[in-house]
Image (cartoon, rainbow, N blue to C red):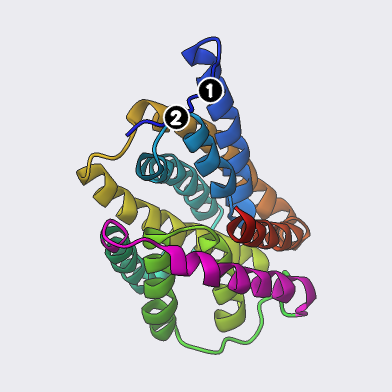
Amino acid sequence: MVNSSRPALHSVTELDAILFAIALLAGLIDAIAGGGGLLTVPALLWSGLGPVEALATNKLQASFGSSTATFAFLRQGALDLRRSRLAVACTFLGASAGALLVQHLHPELLQRVIPVLLAGSAVYFLFSPRVADVDSHRRIGDGVFALTIGTTVGFYDGFFGPGTGTFFAAAFILLLGYNLRRATAHTKLLNFTSNIASLCWVVLGGYVAWKTGLVMASGQLIGAWTGSHLVLRHGGRVVRPLLVVISLAIAVKLLFG
């Protein structure tokens, strides 16, 4: 269902240009710290899409951004695909389950719980000496990480979404001991996986606004490419402050609308 509060712009081209610019900025932010949905979902609602269509179309355009960032990290040797295979599989299954369940349940409970978790993540990123450009001690194995974090955070992204990148990054740093650059790269791989899994189900449901989604996808491509290269060049100097800001921004957004 299309929202009746569609903005009174002079032309469709003007609306497309605004959505493109918003997606470009969101792709840049997402590639570095996650949280681009804070910009794109409200923009899609503002453009006239209903809530379900906005969330579905957001998955389409976000998939382009996360795939671009993942490919950039892969080309630079920042990803270990062999060790990530199980985590990718578990994330895909979790996100699929979440995307199916959200069609039957309203995620109000998560809206109340997630801001607290995100605020805690922000405090951790801000003060923990382990969040740096140097790998630290891992606490669990890859298999346990895949089954717990991959499945649960993947499910969360399919069901609700905001803060997914932050949760993945925190888990890679806290549980596997990854440095910021490495954690960001592997976060985008799993984020891309959960985006694709969710997208498959919303496409089957017929909820995607393809023209709008593809306009924003082109902006995501540019923003994600730029953001991923900033991470590769500057590491923690870019990632750490943005993770703190984005975590708090999402928490405030969910708490106060």
Dot 2 surroundings within 10 Å: few (below 14), some, or many (20 or more)?
some
Task: Tell me the residue at 38%/83% (across/down).
Answer: 143
For mark 1, give the secondary structure.
loop
In front here: 159 or 141? 159
In the image as oriented, which residue stretches furthest toward the left? 204
Name the quadrant of the N terminus: top left
In the image as oriented, which residue stretches furthest toward the bottom? 139
Compared across the picture, whether 61 is left or right of 125 comes to left
Q: Is residue 110 magenta?
A: yes
Find residue 223 and report its horizontal and vertical position in percent.
59, 38
Find residue 211 and report its horizontal and vertical position in percent.
37, 25
Q: Which residue is mark 2?
A: 48
Task: Tell me the residue at 32%/59% (across/down).
Answer: 102
Q: What kind of residue is marked 2?
A: Gly
Find residue 32 and report its horizontal and vertical position in percent.
63, 53
In front here: 21 or 137? 21
In front here: 120 or 104? 104
Task: Tell me the residue at 55%/74% (across/down).
Answer: 172
In front here: 118 or 94? 118
**Quarter of the image holding residue 123?**
bottom right
The region drawn magenta spans: 101-129
Q: What kind of residue is marked 1?
A: Pro
Q: On residue 148, which mark appears? A: none
Q: Is residue 186 magenta?
A: no
Chief SS of the magenta region: helix
- Compared with 85, 2 (above or below) is above
Q: Earlier in the sequence, mark 1 or mark 2?
A: 1
- Do labels 1 and 2 touch, CB within 8 Å? yes
Q: Which residue is mark 1?
A: 7
